[in-house]
Image (cartoon, grey):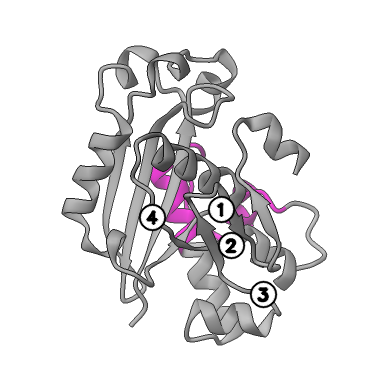
Amino acid sequence: ELNFISIDFETANDNLLSACALGVVEFENSTMRSENHLLINPPYFQRRLKEENYNIHKIPYDLYSKSSSFKAVWSNLTNDMENIIKPGTVFICFNAIFDVSVLTNLLNKYNLSRDFLFYDPMEVAKNLWPNRKSYSLKNISNDLGIELDHHNPVSDANAAGILSLKQLEETGSSSFDELLDNCGLQMIKTDTKNKFFINHYGNKVEVARNFQDIRKK
């Protein structure tokens, strides 16, 4: 029985508090159980829409700025989805430093501090398929026949979840822990209160505050 939750954020600008959308896909027994596309109204000073971001996700300011704050969105989500607050639930996100940083910043902003376990299929792909020219979600999905409407957060989250299942299948692993262990990796563990996480390689990584920080890391 393999249950997990795959998530993907989109931001309005380079500040990682500017999350304007969240895709959440819940998998139960390795099958998609539910999907949620949630719009988020960022904090006032992080609300501005950058043209470059709009060109990527096509979510207009008028749409997300009329939605609820992350605090309200997250509260509704945790009420509807008990696995989100269940200890031991594995969260999937592709290129974890981005989504983990967004989530950590928002949880701190709204005093919702708690910790999570994450599995990053992009980092695992680098270990399983070391000679690929590209490790983008678009290219891996295309090569593996995974349907993807790129930068639609639900589609991105779903594709990351399916990719993770394909990695389990290819390695004959019965759990993400087993797969990571066989690759010499460990589960990503967040320390929300102290604004860092331990990555798949056991290294302590400070959460990014903006998109430029991620490029440096």
Place residue 90 in its image quadrant.
bottom left
CA distance separating discs 3 and 2: 12 Å
Residue under label 4: 114
Label 1 Cα neighbours within 10 Å, binned few <14 / some 14-19 / many ≥20? many
User: Mark 2: which amino acid?
Assistant: Pro
Report helix, strand or loop for mark 2.
helix
- Name the mark on residue 94: 1
Residue at the (34%, 54%) spot, across then down: 25
Residue under label 3: 185
Residue at the (42%, 51%) spot, across then down: 7
Q: Which residues are magenta?
A: 135-161
User: Mark 1: which amino acid?
Assistant: Phe
Report helix, strand or loop for mark 1.
loop
Residue under label 2: 121
Residue 108 placed where, x, y %? Answer: 43, 40
N-terminal-most mark, 3 or 2: 2
N-terminal-most mark, 4 or 3: 4
